[in-house]
Amino acid sequence: MRQGHGEYREPIPPADLIEKFPEAIWPGLMPPDFLPVLGNMAGDWLCMRLGQHGEVAEFVQWYHGGGDWLPWGHTLAQAIAFDAASQHLPGNSRRHAIPAEPMRAEGATGNDPLLEWAIQRLPAGFEQQLIGGPDMDGERLAEQMIAAGVAEVAVQSEWIQRLLSDPELSQLDTDAKAAQRWGVSRQQFNAWMFDTESIPAEVRTKFLADRRPFQDWESAARRCTRVVEIAPHLAWGWDLLGYDAMRRSEFQQAAKHFAIGLTRSVFTDQSIRFRTHWKTDHAAKFSAAMLQELLQSGRVSEKSLAGQYEAEYLRALCADEDSRQEWVTEYWLGRSDRSALAGDYAAAFDEAYAAGWDLGAPSLPAYGSVLDRLVDLAVRAGDAARAELARTHRSCLRDRLGI
């Protein structure tokens, strides 16, 4: 099979995917509804994500260094197009959960067989833009992709990062001594980078010549509203909308956003790229930390949020770091048991899935039992495709790690 020129350039031969133990599958770390199709030769994959009825729900970019993932479109063609366009789009070029760095070694798009294949399967008008070379108009391309619904979530992600990133301060992200020079903890420094309005005036005067750093929360929130509309299963849109509401003292609305964000997988929060990781000492998820803060401060009441979240689950997310994964896994397994007893096997599958891939299971052996459960529940729910894929992930875990 021919390779492309983008970051994700290496197709997996179909024969390799139907092997008993496909090498590209990372059992446990990779969610069990992911089937890798294109690799970057560094351990990261573009994956097909299967839905409940055997359909391809979306194509996602999966990062092996932490398991984070982000939808890159509804089709493989959209994902390849985003790969080609991404280095030119508005944003700060932060990739995965790591700081800004060169995105690919080659960067050429001309005569790329994968891109040429993708362009033929996109709406008309993308060829000139995507093969435009280094002078490509990034904003125009982003607007065109959003208007056509091509990899919209990924494009919006890049644009929102730009709206919340001051160019000068963004350079400090990779500076390990920046917080030390400012005389604060790294956690406090990260909090200030997340919301630059929170930087005290005396600090701005000393280090920024009293310049107010650029952030456009209003525009970012508008784009996040669109993101949660088309991708409500991702955490980062809810996180940012909740915080924007807090900034405007709309505490009840903020709490509602955070309550929804609670149940979104931590692997979908893009916490490094959006800088919400400064709250991880307080809770496993940004939404959990912020919701707990609102409740404890009395800005919102438990009564006003009745039915929007479960106190037991919030306590698990806010437990000591050593206990969080175990408590959250047990919470979801308990819910899955109750749904299965009620005969709702589809819900039981989703809840068992969360037991393994909400925060991550507390140990590798735990993934074995979760995968066994998923296979059984998928079969009972008539979900043949995800049953077979979970069975393959389970086989890989047994073959490689003896679990």
Image (tube, rainbow, N blue to C red):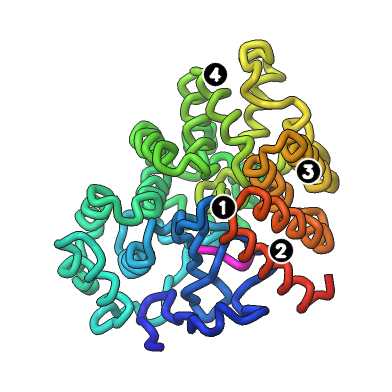
Q: Earlier in the sequence, mark 3 or mark 4?
A: 4
For residue 125, side relative to residue 217 (left or right): left
- Alpha carbon of mark 3 to alpha carbon of mark 1: how far? 29 Å
Residue assigned mark 3: 333
* Amino acid at pointer 2: Gly
- Alpha carbon of mark 1 to alpha carbon of mark 4: how far? 25 Å
For residue 125, side relative to residue 398 (left or right): left
Q: Residues within 10 Å of mark 2 (few under 14, many from 20)?
A: many
Q: Is residue 394 above or below residue 371?
A: below
Q: Residue at x 34, y 51 (%)?
A: 152
Q: Magenta region: which residues?
A: 61-65
Q: Is residue 7 above or below residue 174?
A: below
Residue assigned mark 1: 272
Residue assigned mark 4: 251
Which numbered mark, 1 or 2, is in the foreground of this view?
2
- Tell me the quadrant of the picture where the N terminus can be found: bottom left
Which numbered mark, 4 or 2, is in the foreground of this view?
2
Q: Nearer the viewer, residue 192 or 9?
A: 9
- Alpha carbon of mark 2 to alpha carbon of mark 3: how far? 16 Å
Q: Residue furthest bottom?
A: 1
Residue 64 is covered by the magenta coloring:
yes
Residue assigned mark 2: 28
- Alpha carbon of mark 4 to alpha carbon of mark 2: how far? 37 Å
* Amino acid at pointer 4: Phe
